[in-house]
Image: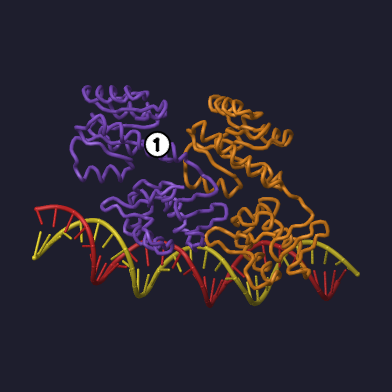
Chain colours: A orange, B purple, C yellow, D red
Amino acid sequence: MVTMADAQILVVDDEPDILSVLVYHLSREGYRVTTAVNGQGALTTADAERPDLIILDLMLPGMDGYEVLQRLKRADRTNSIPVILLTARREEEERVKGFEVGADDYITKPFSARELTLRVEALLRRAKAEPVSVSRRISVGPVELDREAHRAFSEGAEVDLTPLEYRLLEVLLERRGRVQSRRQLLQAVWDTNAAIETRTVDMHVARLRTKLGGAAPLIETVRGIGYRFRALDK
Amino acid sequence: MVTMADAQILVVDDEPDILSVLVYHLSREGYRVTTAVNGQGALTTADAERPDLIILDLMLPGMDGYEVLQRLKRADRTNSIPVILLTARREEEERVKGFEVGADDYITKPFSARELTLRVEALLRRAKAEPVSVSRRISVGPVELDREAHRAFSEGAEVDLTPLEYRLLEVLLERRGRVQSRRQLLQAVWDTNAAIETRTVDMHVARLRTKLGGAAPLIETVRGIGYRFRALDK
DNA sequence: AGGAAGCGTCACGAGTTTGTCACAAGTTCC
DNA sequence: GGAACTTGTGACAAACTCGTGACGCTTCCT
């Protein structure tokens, strides 16, 4: 079993038993492990230590897991730290909610050591494979973004975008190929948990589509879920 | 005969004779065996010890086998612990009811030691082969699911699925090789215990079949029980 | 063989989701 | 202060989804 060299993992759980089991297994696999027993501590530690991965129990005293997750994702716009949710039961609703808020994976208690390490590795591997590219330019298919100049191009020609449209496009490009729920987009584009109708996202997607033009629909609708930028890479 | 290393099995039966026969055979095969003589004990032990497999007699004093099974499956939504039912006669009705509630296999008394160990091994092998994974991609035979992109493929070509069809396929793939009763599918796909005719499941299975195409029937009908995705693995 | 039950498929209508328009409120810039 | 622009929302039509009844075929049982 290959361990990602030297990765640091933050484990957040208020139950000592579970916490120690997690720490034990992860340490044995060679990871550096930090712990937190509540939401506040989790946020502080995440901020201070920049771990490579966070394992987060949904049931926490005080600030609950979802809120921690939301704040994490908000404070860390690049989405660079993957989060695995830990939950008591596989409630479909919880799973959906978790992914909506930006979880990367999901483990149901009780879990086996094998299951745990498999997922941890999978996420670390993926994170490594996609270094958070804050590159100057993003280009996907006919669309191009120059972040330094803050300009967008479609088929070579410059497209005049409003600030909001620009950010929406940026987010979609960064996560190209992956469905983004309306809620996810709202969170990523409209900083705060703005009290905004999810339908508004549709409006802006529509505007973006028109401005980007092109025959093929670059921004695809995934009915019942959200939107996805076509992943015709470079 | 290869034994799954170190697996733990919980045997639930109130008849001392049968219990000891079971314990004897299983121990001889190298399994760790725990026992319970009634429903309440079974649930407690299952919860505390997390066995890898449960062998459950249907005839129990007090809480009967079905109820134990139901509670087990309810407490453990991942379906991670396989259950073999033990019953006196091969009543068709019992068999159906057992599968409906989520049993994974079925042994009729009297049984041979060989039959017992064969089934135990089969189930343990399968459980090991499918760590309950929320992996990014599932691929079974010609069918593939990309959960991040929320796309489905059959023989390489993308298949356009409705949200419901997608979830149905997802569930069938996750539990590939295992029969799923209509009721189980309803519960897994239609979040709530929606008041929906079980026949409706047939309709959607039919639609899925058409969309997935292919010569071989990927989704098999198990008459009187439900459906099963063929387990032609990787 | 005959009947019953299970299953596959068709067609249709109610309900939901999405694209688009129009417009008002807010902002920016001169 | 006013014009141009941005952005959120309600409204509505079009597209799509999905549950159900109906009907005929197959399978099973006696």
User: Is B66 in front, or is A173?
Assistant: A173
- Residue B48 in view (yes/no): no
Which residue is at a point 57% across and 48% down the rendered structure image?
A: A99
Q: Position of residue B156 (x, y in %)?
A: 51, 59
Q: Is residue B38 left or right of residue A215?
A: left
Classify 10 Å Cα crowding around label 1: few (below 14), some (14-19), many (20 and above).
few
Which residue is at a point 48% across and 62% down the rendered structure image?
A: B161
Q: Position of residue A11 (x, y in %)?
A: 61, 32
Residue A61: name its quadrant. Answer: top right
Q: Position of residue B16 (x, y in %)?
A: 22, 22
> From what the image shows, is residue B70 above or below residue A200?
above
Residue A213: name its quadrant. Answer: bottom right
Q: Secondary structure at mark 1?
A: helix
Q: Is residue B66 left or right of residue A4?
A: left
The count of marks equals 1
User: Is B165 in front, or is A197?
Assistant: B165
**Which image quarter holds the N terminus of chain A?**
top right
Q: Which residue is mark 1?
A: B125
